[in-house]
């Protein structure tokens, strides 16, 4: 099983690395560009839609692996991949011409409803703390929020590649210590695809992921994390994506309190403020990498000490958020002086 996992990951990495080059040429030829504005974190028009190579590669490699060396039932794989493909199609339209918020949410809700069929049917994500109907409803809301926050957080060069590689790699690491080996292959494919794309997306980015990449990626990663939680590994499922969860959720709360339109583009995430204050994306993303490595280690520690590991992860994440906020505050003080 491990051999199949590493072979699939290697194929995904190569497919995305070279596939992104082809997509980049096509996007430039058709002038499908993300133009800078007052809410952007980039300075020059940059091709948007690199997620096409990422999502197509993940779907193709995981489907081939499911047919050749099945670890997860083919019906489950097909449900997840069909929902991903539907989200990718709608998100590509959104990248090209924009799609009404209501339509986006409707299709996302339908994809999540379909995805619930791919969760372990005999297990509960919230471990029996709530009735079955509430478990399904809360799981759906969490899934819907996660795939949207994944899109919201894709705001500086390299960040989503780093986060996807860390979460996918963290699940592969967990599989070495816990009976979740069947999740290792799809998680490794996600991590490898993210690393292949990171070659093109590291600062200064030559291409952006776009909604076509970030939304389906968020969907797939949420499925992996919810499956972990349903099997009883709720602490690792919270720890691995904790930076994204914390930054996006706190930022949403702050924007809500200010009466802002939540669906409009902005740059008020902690990492964005730090990137603006420092004048560069790479140092901010490197600090997130360091935190993600800590979170991966704590996710493994959570197999024995879930509460202690979760507290340590929350403290580490809070410290990075505080550091990013302090950077922005320091710039304001200098300007005021």
Image (cartoon, rainbow, N blue to C red):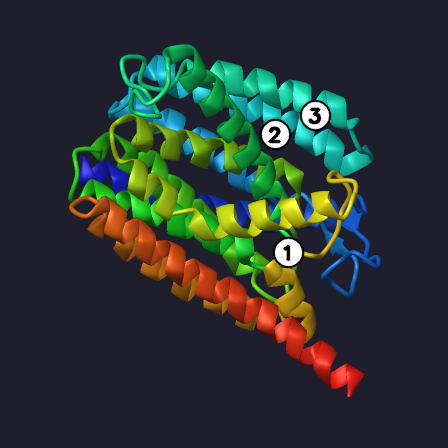
Residue 334, x across and y down, in percent: 73, 85
Q: Which residue is identified by label 2?
A: 88
Circle 1 crowding by C-alpha within 10 Å: few under 14, some 14–19, many from 20:
many
Q: Going 78% across and 49% down the picture, which residue do you hit?
A: 33
Residue 53, x across and y down, in percent: 56, 41
Q: Which residue is identified by label 3?
A: 104
Residue 270, x across and y down, in percent: 60, 60
Q: Going 45% across and 66% down the picture, which residue do you hit?
A: 319
What secondary structure is marked by label 2? helix
Q: Nearer the viewer, residue 308 or 210?
A: 308
Q: Going 72% across and 46% down the picture, which residue do you hit?
A: 257
Q: Which residue is identified by label 1?
A: 269
**Residue 155 appears left or right of 173:** right
**Where does the C terminus fall, quadrant-wise?**
bottom right
Cα separation between marks 2 and 3: 11 Å
What secondary structure is marked by label 1? loop
The mark nearer the N terminus, 1 or 2, is: 2
Q: Quadrant of residue 131?
A: top left
Tell me if I can see residue 10 in this picture: no
Residue found at the very far bottom of the displayed protein? 337
């Amino acid at each position: 099983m491990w051999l199949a996992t590493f072979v699939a990951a290697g194929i995904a990495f190569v497919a995305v690395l070279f596939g992104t080059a082809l997509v980049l040429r096509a996007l430039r030829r058709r002038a499908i560009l993300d133009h800078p504005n007052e809410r952007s974190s980039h300075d020059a028009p940059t091709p948007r839609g690199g997620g096409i190579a990422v999502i197509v590669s993940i779907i193709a490699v995981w489907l081939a692996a499911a047919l050749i060396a099945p670890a997860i039932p083919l019906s489950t794989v097909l449900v997840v991949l069909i929902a991903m493909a539907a989200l990718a199609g709608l998100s590509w339209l959104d990248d090209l011409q924009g799609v009404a918020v209501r339509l986006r949410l409707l299709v996302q809700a339908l994809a999540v409803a379909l995805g619930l069929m791919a969760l372990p049917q005999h297990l509960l994500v919230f471990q029996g703390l709530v009735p079955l109907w509430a478990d399904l409803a809360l799981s759906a809301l969490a899934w819907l929020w996660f795939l949207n926050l994944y899109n919201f957080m894709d705001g500086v060069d390299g960040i989503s590649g780093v986060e996807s590689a860390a979460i996918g790699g963290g699940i592969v690491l967990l599989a070495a210590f816990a009976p979740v080996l069947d999740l290792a292959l799809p998680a490794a494919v996600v991590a490898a695809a993210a690393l292949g794309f990171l070659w093109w997306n590291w600062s200064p980015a030559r291409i952006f992921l776009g909604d076509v990449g970030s939304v389906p990626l968020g969907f797939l990663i949420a499925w992996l994390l919810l499956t972990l939680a349903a099997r009883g590994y709720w602490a690792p499922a919270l720890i691995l994506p904790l930076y994204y969860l914390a930054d996006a959720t706190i930022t949403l709360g702050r924007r809500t309190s200010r009466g802002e339109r939540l669906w409009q583009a902005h740059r008020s995430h902690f990492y964005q403020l730090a990137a603006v204050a420092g004048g560069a994306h790479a140092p901010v993303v490197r600090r997130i990498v360091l935190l993600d490595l800590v979170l991966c280690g704590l996710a493994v520690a959570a197999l024995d000490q879930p509460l202690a590991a979760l507290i340590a992860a929350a403290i580490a994440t809070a410290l990075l958020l505080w550091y990013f906020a302090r950077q922005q505050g320091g710039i304001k003080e200098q300007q005021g002086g």
